[in-house]
Image (spheres, rainbow, N blue to C red):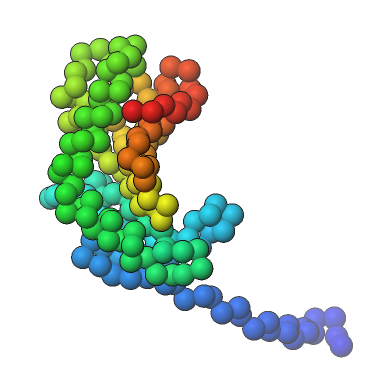
Amino acid sequence: MGLFSRKKKEEKPEKAQPEKIMFDSPLGTFTYINNPGANEFGYEGYIQWYAGSIEDDITTAYIDTDSPESTQAGLCYARLEGLFADRDRVEAEMTERIADYFLRSPDMIASGYNKQMITDDSQLFWLGVFRNGDTRFSYDTAGVYANDITVTIHADGSREIEYRSNIDYEMHTDTM
Protein backbone atom coordinates (compact mmCIF):
# COMPACT_ATOMS: atom_id res chain seq x y z
CA MET A 1 0.00 0.00 0.00
CA GLY A 2 1.18 3.43 -0.85
CA LEU A 3 1.24 6.39 1.40
CA PHE A 4 -2.00 7.78 0.00
CA SER A 5 -3.90 4.58 -0.68
CA ARG A 6 -7.28 4.28 0.95
CA LYS A 7 -8.58 1.38 2.83
CA LYS A 8 -12.18 0.65 1.97
CA LYS A 9 -14.46 1.19 4.95
CA GLU A 10 -16.66 -1.65 5.94
CA GLU A 11 -20.23 -0.52 5.69
CA LYS A 12 -22.39 -1.38 8.64
CA PRO A 13 -25.97 -2.26 7.94
CA GLU A 14 -28.31 0.45 9.18
CA LYS A 15 -30.49 -0.42 12.09
CA ALA A 16 -34.09 -0.55 11.09
CA GLN A 17 -35.99 2.26 12.74
CA PRO A 18 -39.15 1.00 14.40
CA GLU A 19 -42.18 2.24 12.55
CA LYS A 20 -44.10 4.87 14.44
CA ILE A 21 -47.47 3.71 15.65
CA MET A 22 -50.05 6.39 15.01
CA PHE A 23 -53.77 6.77 14.65
CA ASP A 24 -55.90 9.49 13.15
CA SER A 25 -59.10 10.55 14.83
CA PRO A 26 -61.59 13.38 14.56
CA LEU A 27 -59.64 15.12 17.35
CA GLY A 28 -56.24 14.83 15.64
CA THR A 29 -53.34 12.48 15.00
CA PHE A 30 -51.88 10.60 17.96
CA THR A 31 -48.40 9.06 18.14
CA TYR A 32 -47.50 6.13 20.38
CA ILE A 33 -45.07 6.73 23.26
CA ASN A 34 -43.35 3.80 24.96
CA ASN A 35 -41.28 5.10 27.86
CA PRO A 36 -41.03 2.39 30.55
CA GLY A 37 -38.73 4.51 32.75
CA ALA A 38 -41.51 7.05 33.21
CA ASN A 39 -44.28 4.44 33.10
CA GLU A 40 -45.65 6.08 29.95
CA PHE A 41 -47.39 3.76 27.57
CA GLY A 42 -49.79 5.82 25.55
CA TYR A 43 -50.40 8.26 22.76
CA GLU A 44 -49.77 11.96 22.45
CA GLY A 45 -51.38 14.32 20.00
CA TYR A 46 -52.52 17.87 19.50
CA ILE A 47 -56.15 18.86 19.78
CA GLN A 48 -57.94 22.11 19.18
CA TRP A 49 -59.52 22.44 22.63
CA TYR A 50 -60.61 26.00 22.02
CA ALA A 51 -63.06 26.33 19.14
CA GLY A 52 -61.76 28.60 16.41
CA SER A 53 -58.34 28.83 18.03
CA ILE A 54 -55.15 29.52 16.16
CA GLU A 55 -52.12 27.23 16.03
CA ASP A 56 -50.60 28.71 19.21
CA ASP A 57 -53.69 27.67 21.13
CA ILE A 58 -53.34 23.96 20.36
CA THR A 59 -53.54 21.72 23.44
CA THR A 60 -51.33 18.65 23.85
CA ALA A 61 -53.36 15.59 24.80
CA TYR A 62 -51.99 12.37 26.28
CA ILE A 63 -53.99 9.16 26.59
CA ASP A 64 -52.83 5.95 28.23
CA THR A 65 -53.05 2.64 26.44
CA ASP A 66 -55.56 0.12 27.78
CA SER A 67 -52.62 -1.68 29.43
CA PRO A 68 -48.82 -1.30 29.36
CA GLU A 69 -48.61 -4.45 27.24
CA SER A 70 -51.01 -3.16 24.56
CA THR A 71 -50.94 -0.41 21.97
CA GLN A 72 -54.75 -0.14 22.06
CA ALA A 73 -56.09 3.00 23.72
CA GLY A 74 -59.84 2.73 23.23
CA LEU A 75 -60.83 3.28 26.88
CA CYS A 76 -58.86 6.48 27.47
CA TYR A 77 -59.60 7.80 23.99
CA ALA A 78 -63.33 7.39 24.63
CA ARG A 79 -62.93 9.40 27.86
CA LEU A 80 -61.01 12.07 25.94
CA GLU A 81 -63.81 12.25 23.37
CA GLY A 82 -66.32 12.69 26.20
CA LEU A 83 -64.29 15.52 27.73
CA PHE A 84 -63.91 17.14 24.33
CA ALA A 85 -67.63 16.92 23.57
CA ASP A 86 -68.34 18.66 26.91
CA ARG A 87 -65.30 20.94 26.83
CA ASP A 88 -67.17 24.20 27.49
CA ARG A 89 -68.51 22.88 30.79
CA VAL A 90 -65.20 21.20 31.67
CA GLU A 91 -63.26 24.36 30.88
CA ALA A 92 -65.61 26.53 32.97
CA GLU A 93 -65.35 24.13 35.92
CA MET A 94 -61.56 23.84 35.81
CA THR A 95 -60.84 27.56 35.44
CA GLU A 96 -63.39 28.44 38.12
CA ARG A 97 -61.86 25.95 40.56
CA ILE A 98 -58.38 27.33 39.86
CA ALA A 99 -59.57 30.92 40.39
CA ASP A 100 -61.44 30.01 43.59
CA TYR A 101 -58.42 28.16 44.96
CA PHE A 102 -56.01 31.07 44.47
CA LEU A 103 -58.52 33.71 45.54
CA ARG A 104 -58.46 32.10 49.02
CA SER A 105 -54.87 33.38 49.27
CA PRO A 106 -54.93 37.06 48.28
CA ASP A 107 -51.11 37.23 48.32
CA MET A 108 -51.16 34.80 45.36
CA ILE A 109 -53.26 37.16 43.19
CA ALA A 110 -51.84 39.98 41.06
CA SER A 111 -53.13 43.44 41.87
CA GLY A 112 -56.41 44.24 40.14
CA TYR A 113 -57.25 40.64 39.20
CA ASN A 114 -60.63 39.17 40.07
CA LYS A 115 -62.24 35.78 39.51
CA GLN A 116 -63.58 36.59 36.04
CA MET A 117 -60.24 37.91 34.86
CA ILE A 118 -58.43 34.80 36.11
CA THR A 119 -60.90 32.44 34.44
CA ASP A 120 -60.77 34.43 31.20
CA ASP A 121 -56.95 34.47 31.21
CA SER A 122 -56.50 30.74 31.87
CA GLN A 123 -55.55 28.45 29.02
CA LEU A 124 -55.35 24.66 28.94
CA PHE A 125 -52.05 23.60 27.39
CA TRP A 126 -51.91 19.91 28.38
CA LEU A 127 -54.55 17.28 29.11
CA GLY A 128 -53.88 13.70 30.24
CA VAL A 129 -56.31 10.80 30.50
CA PHE A 130 -54.97 7.78 32.40
CA ARG A 131 -56.00 4.14 32.62
CA ASN A 132 -56.24 4.37 36.44
CA GLY A 133 -59.16 6.79 36.00
CA ASP A 134 -57.25 10.01 36.69
CA THR A 135 -57.53 13.03 34.40
CA ARG A 136 -55.02 15.88 34.57
CA PHE A 137 -55.45 19.42 33.27
CA SER A 138 -52.44 21.77 33.06
CA TYR A 139 -53.06 25.48 32.69
CA ASP A 140 -51.24 28.71 32.01
CA THR A 141 -53.04 31.22 34.18
CA ALA A 142 -52.48 34.97 34.24
CA GLY A 143 -53.17 36.95 37.37
CA VAL A 144 -51.87 34.40 39.87
CA TYR A 145 -48.36 34.07 41.22
CA ALA A 146 -47.98 30.43 40.18
CA ASN A 147 -46.76 28.35 37.25
CA ASP A 148 -47.15 24.72 36.23
CA ILE A 149 -50.74 24.64 37.54
CA THR A 150 -52.15 21.13 37.24
CA VAL A 151 -55.53 19.97 38.46
CA THR A 152 -56.01 16.20 38.81
CA ILE A 153 -59.44 14.64 39.03
CA HIS A 154 -58.90 11.21 40.55
CA ALA A 155 -61.00 8.16 39.73
CA ASP A 156 -62.80 8.52 43.08
CA GLY A 157 -63.85 12.10 42.18
CA SER A 158 -61.45 13.84 44.54
CA ARG A 159 -59.51 16.78 43.15
CA GLU A 160 -55.95 17.88 43.71
CA ILE A 161 -54.03 20.97 42.61
CA GLU A 162 -50.29 21.16 42.11
CA TYR A 163 -48.38 24.32 41.24
CA ARG A 164 -45.05 26.06 41.50
CA SER A 165 -45.32 29.26 43.54
CA ASN A 166 -43.72 32.38 42.12
CA ILE A 167 -43.31 33.55 45.71
CA ASP A 168 -41.23 30.72 47.21
CA TYR A 169 -40.43 28.86 43.92
CA GLU A 170 -41.47 25.55 45.44
CA MET A 171 -43.99 22.97 44.26
CA HIS A 172 -47.19 22.85 46.29
CA THR A 173 -49.88 20.16 46.32
CA ASP A 174 -53.28 20.59 47.93
CA THR A 175 -56.77 19.12 47.78
CA MET A 176 -59.50 21.20 46.19
Tell which of 153 and 20 is nearer to you. Answer: 153
Residue beneath the point at 28% across and 55% down: 80
Instruction: Tell me if residue 167 can be seen.
Output: yes
Residue 105 to residue 37: above or below: above
- Quadrant of residue 90 within the rendered picture: top left
- Quadrant of residue 174 within the rendered picture: top left
Q: Position of residue 110 (x, y in %)?
A: 28, 16
- Quadrant of residue 112 within the rendered picture: top left
Residue beneath the point at 68% across and 84% down: 11
Residue beneath the point at 73% across and 84% down: 10
Residue 155 to residue 116: above or below: below
Q: Position of residue 15 (x, y in %)?
A: 60, 78
Q: Is residue 117 left or right of residue 103?
A: left
Q: Is residue 39 left or right of residue 94?
A: right
Q: Is residue 141 left or right of residue 14?
A: left
Q: Quadrant of the C terminus?
A: top left
Q: Position of residue 140 (x, y in %)?
A: 31, 34
Outermost left residue:
52
Q: Position of residue 4 (x, y in %)?
A: 80, 81
